Amino acid sequence: MNSFKKNLLKKRYNAERRFQWYGKIAIGLALSFLAVFMFQIFSKGYSAFQKTWIVTEVHYDKELLLIDAESPSKDDLENADYYDVAYKAMTSLDPGLPEEEDRQLIQMVSYKYEAEVKDLLLKNPDYLGKIVPIKLTASDDVDQVHKGNYPRDIPEENRRVNDYQLQIYDMLNERGDILLEFNISFFTSPDSREAELAGIASSFMGTVFSILVCLAFSFPVAVLAAIYLEEFAPKNKFTDFIEVNINNLAAVPSIVFGLLGLGVLLAVFNLPRSTPLVGGITLSLMTLPTIIIAARASLKAVPPSIREAALAMGASNMQTTMHHTVPLSMPGTLSGTIIGLAQALGETAPLILIGMVAFVNTIPGTPVDPAASLPVQIYIWSESAERGFVEKVSACIMVLLAFLILMNLTAQIVRHKFEKKWS
Amino acid sequence: MNLILVTFIILLAFTSYYFGRKKALVIQSSQRLTALPKFYGYYLAAWCAAPALIIFALWSVFEPSIVKTFILQDYTDQNLTKNELQLIYTKVKALAAGTYTGNITNFLDESANKYIQLKGIANSAKVAIILAILIFSLSFAYRSVQKNDRMREPVEIFLKWVLFVASLGAVLVTIGIVFSLLFEAIRFFQAVKIFDFIFGTHWYPAKTFVRDGQPDPELMKDAFGAVPLFAGTFFIAFIAMCVAIPIGLLSGIYLSEYAGRGIRKYAKPIIEILAGIPTVVYGFFAALTVGPFVKEIGNAMGLEVSAESALAAGAVMGVMIIPFISSLSDDVMTAVPQNLRDGSYAMGATKSETVKKVIFPAALPGIVGSILLAVSRAVGETMIVVMASGLAANLTMNPLESTSTITAQIVVILIGDQQFGDPKTQSAFALGISLFIVTLFLNVIALSVVKKYREKYE
């Protein structure tokens, strides 16, 4: 009997230990998902912050540039013909190459290499007639080869970089004429069909504009609504209905808001398609309940003694609310707002529906210019087959995550630094 | 034009604020004020801005449709359908704006001229009416100020109304959602029988694409059967829950019952990061890493696996949903009163027995609520499915094949240019309303379950 009891106890303790382990494993799994995820993104994406350049020499030959004037003006340089100069700069890498094969060399740099040759001369007019070294943006295939993301040992016909190009690449690499530098253009240039030229400037501005529009629409309405519901609303069926409504609205899938934006903002109000204005309004409808709920919670957290003191001094209800309750609740409201905006920042589906997936190769200057947004840019790039875009997507994700972390940190700081502790 | 008008009204409101306040200070020199001077300013400013802006908003809403009726009056005798009339009106507007490229008939030209004329009349009428209202309301308000009426109450009542109107905003959004979805969905159900939509088993909206002309009703009948989408949606949500419920629930239990304060303090927010990552990022991860990984494992086991399998999308979605379940169930279990635990320990139960037999049943309503919320979240999730699962609507229960969901099809249909009035576009709204109903249903149940539970212990 005694040993039976002992066994039972042992069994129960074992069950206890097992159960505890299940919990630990579950948490470990959740954390390791996060870790794997972050590792994948970072290991794939960090190389996008570097850009490969091919260094060659360019001869700014006046004759080839078709410049006649003795001391050419800025306009002359602007209108000169750079085709031959740029072409020579590339083909000089391998003078022995027959002319009909020269495409192989040209393909090693981005298709904008002619513009780069031009820009260098425009910046340094005294280079005219001289032979100077120049950095040209490498094509995304060469870029991927240089970063080691591209297997070299697969058969040539399956490779986007052929044997000849690899040979030239190796030669240049040995000479130190392949440079890897910080990729500024990733942050300053708009989207492009070519991976080596594509940047996030257009989608970044699109995101900034949409978030500002979203803030401008949702914050005032949400705060006012929260004040009414928390401080003034009589307790009746209608205010109950509003409350239930807000709670349900907070859980409506985001894509439904996209349909709303499409069916009402675009079809009825005829607002311009694909613009951050429409995107921002759509997102603001989505953020509205989030901010209302946060604002109500922080209004509720202001102790009644504050209100009673104000009322005792003869303030009206409105004065009590506007002078005391609302300012005291602001830190909580603001941090709730920032969290709501951070949610809106990551939304993709509603923006796709209102047309913010259009290919935009200009940087939008106002909220009514067509634009993409960072998450949509991730979607667009990840649908693209070119290999160079994989690292761009990961880098774009890193920028987006950095943005989100920044916003959430700000929310935390606002909450902890400015919120009064009542106790 | 509109911008100038609004700016003018707002500037006038600011000026009247200063004017009213100054007036109050003047009054103060001879008699006692009935309110603080600034309320005189607010009073004037409110009377200045509110009526004018309300009229302006109403006018802007109704003007286009009135102008449209006037223009289309000329076409009533031609027996045109609604769509054709709409087309004509678009042409007239484009012609008036000078962006029309096409052959211009006399009739069209006449209409365009009429349109420009009407617009001109409407604009001047708008300005005149608003100016009149401004003068009227300002003079009325100014008389009250002069008489030194009580100023604070009306201002506060006005503010209260502003607050009330703002709180209607959320209701308006809901109404907007319901109506915009219903409006298009009803038109869709005029073309496609609702029965065919709910019980049909073939979803090929691309089949109905016919350039110039109405699609064949026979084709339509077989193209919009939403059963594969409903099945796919719940199938993927089911896979997600298979991942999320065990992990989420066990983490929640561990966090609330076992973890020390230190672990809880750090582990909980870190797990919640999973919920904060944008879904498009998960989609990319699922498509690029998990999908091929699942395929490789499946192939190694000799199974046929699609690169865009439901399993990959569902599993990643499940990871996303873990924190919803873990945090909420942690909260409800922490809220279970300590004396229930103490009672159980006093009877000699171990911690895990207490959790299983006492705390879990006590917290069950809240946990069910959190799971329902998570399901609703999984049903409404879009980007993961769009990017990682297939876009072809297969009716399958094999997690290794690709399926599609309601949300993914909405995106597929509406990406790019949409043609309103096309049954394909309208079908997206019909899908939207079914999604809305399903998630609303889940939320209402979840919220009421959670609420009921809360009342029990407070």
Image: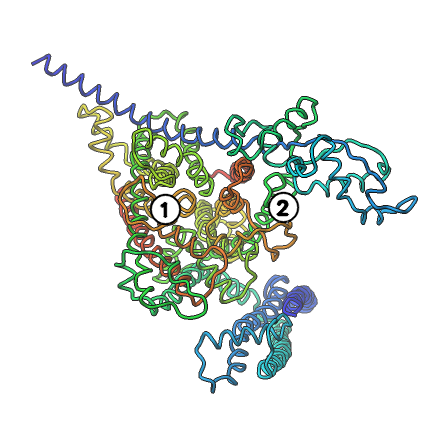
Position of A120 compared to B359: left or right?
right
Foreground pick, B179 / A369: A369
Quarter occupied by residue B32:
bottom right
**Residue that appears at 52% across and 31% down:** A44
**Residue that appears at 22% across and 24% down:** B350
Foreground pick, A401 / A315: A401
Question: Badge 2 local density, few (<14 within 10 Å), some, or many (20+)?
Answer: many
Q: Is residue A10 visible?
A: yes
Looking at this view, name the residue that lies furthest to the bottom. Answer: B77
Quarter occupied by residue B320:
top left
Residue A288, position in %: x, y?
47, 53
Q: Which quarter of the rendered picture does the N terminus of chain B lie within? A: bottom right
Residue A190 bears which disc, if any? 2
Q: Is residue A235 visible?
A: no
The residue singled out by tag 1 in the image is B377
The answer to whether residue B36 is above or below residue A78 is below
Residue at disc 1, secondary structure: helix
Residue A253 bears which disc, if any? none
Give the number of the mark in front: 2 or 1.
2
Q: Chain of mark 1?
A: B
Residue A217, position in %: x, y?
54, 56
Q: Report the amino acid beneath label 1.
A: Arg
